Image (tube, grey):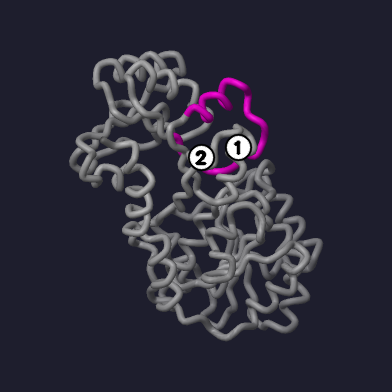
Amino acid sequence: MVAMSEHPETNNIFILPRLQREAVTQLPVGIRQFPAVGSRLLYSLQAIRLALKLKPRIVYCGHAFMAPLALLVARLAGARLLSHVHGLEVWEPLPPTKRHALASSDLILCVSNFTAGKVVEVTGVNPKRCEVIYNTIDDRFTPGDRAAARAHFGLAQEAVVLSTVSRLDCGQRHKGHDRIIPLLAELSRDVPGLTYVIAGTGDDRDRLEGLAHDTGAADLVRFLGFVPDADLPDLYRASDLYVMPSHGEGFGIAFVEAMCCGTPALGLDIGGAGDALRDGELGRAVAKADFAHALRDAVTAAPADHADLAARTRATFGRSAFAERLARACGPLLP
């Protein structure tokens, strides 16, 4: 929204959230956010009321599940419909109403080429109405004091640290922790001080702890639990490698956050992760069958040039690059 508000053809942006965890205390000039409306019915009525009152030129839909309401609101206001698709919501067949509404969008922003392909496959929309807009990150993800970052998390300075940041939910086992843990015991024989740090909470933690115990890696894995957003840059800085062999990423923003901190990243060449890793240009995206070998190579590789990796990553995914891509994509929607 900030990038859109900076477009010269944008006058005002109005946001109507349905759910809101924290109160918004300050917004950029030109952006106004209304109070959240938790009830689906009341939210729909409020969206329609505001559309008729404000007459926006563009209605932005941030999730495919909201597309039917967004389409109705856009039609009532005589506005263009701009939808934004992130990944998993279009990896399975959509109900007809959501499929029709998404396909009726004037423009669909997709976080990766893989997601764009899925949108075309699921909705049958003309590919020319899909634009790939990679996610961006904020300026706090930068290289920093590695020693201080390790001290913050109680990690030995001489350790070889792998890390993964994600929810530990039974419904999100695609993140791939259980591809890493069974490899650690053997890998540690050649890599003294190997430590795998897992950040995140969820109901799958007990299973992963049991897997670490059963594979002889209990002493090599540290479960940090919840890590506040403010501490994530230090976690990446403390790591020698960010690794997430997920087979269910619409994009994989954690890869980008880590690399912007100068930390190499490794994932699978499945879904949208290849776009985040730039298919080897910034990080490595490998086939499932090659993951164990790639992990060993990455752990034993020469230290990365943190500043260079961070600069190249930010040049691709930083806010200025994001704003330029968004302006090009949305330009035809604005008079």
The residue positioned 73% from the left and 58% from the top of the image is 178
Asked if residue 79 lies left or right of residue 134, the reply is left
- Specify few, some or many for label 1: CA neighbours under 10 Å numbering under 14, 14-19, or 20 or more: many
Q: Is residue 154 above or below residue 318?
A: below
Residue 58: quarter of image: top left
* SS at mark 1 in the image: helix
The residue positioned 63% from the left and 77% from the top of the image is 298
Disc 2 + disc 1, Cβ < 8 Å: yes
Residue 119 within the segment the image draws in magenta: no
* SS at mark 2 in the image: strand
First in sequence: mark 2 vs mark 1? 2
Q: Residue 69: x, y in percent? A: 45, 21
Question: Image quadrant for the N terminus?
Answer: top left
Q: Nearer the viewer, residue 64 or 139?
A: 64
Total label count? Answer: 2
Q: Which residue is mark 2?
A: 85
Q: Nearer the viewer, residue 51 or 153?
A: 51
What is the three-letter code of the residue carrying label 1?
Val
Q: Which residue is mark 1?
A: 90
Q: Nearer the viewer, residue 219 or 128?
A: 128
- Marks 2 and 1 sit apart, C-alpha to C-alpha, by 8 Å
What is the three-letter code of the residue carrying label 2?
Val
Q: Is residue 152 above or below residue 192?
A: above
The magenta span reads: 83-104
Q: Residue 78: x, y in percent? A: 33, 20
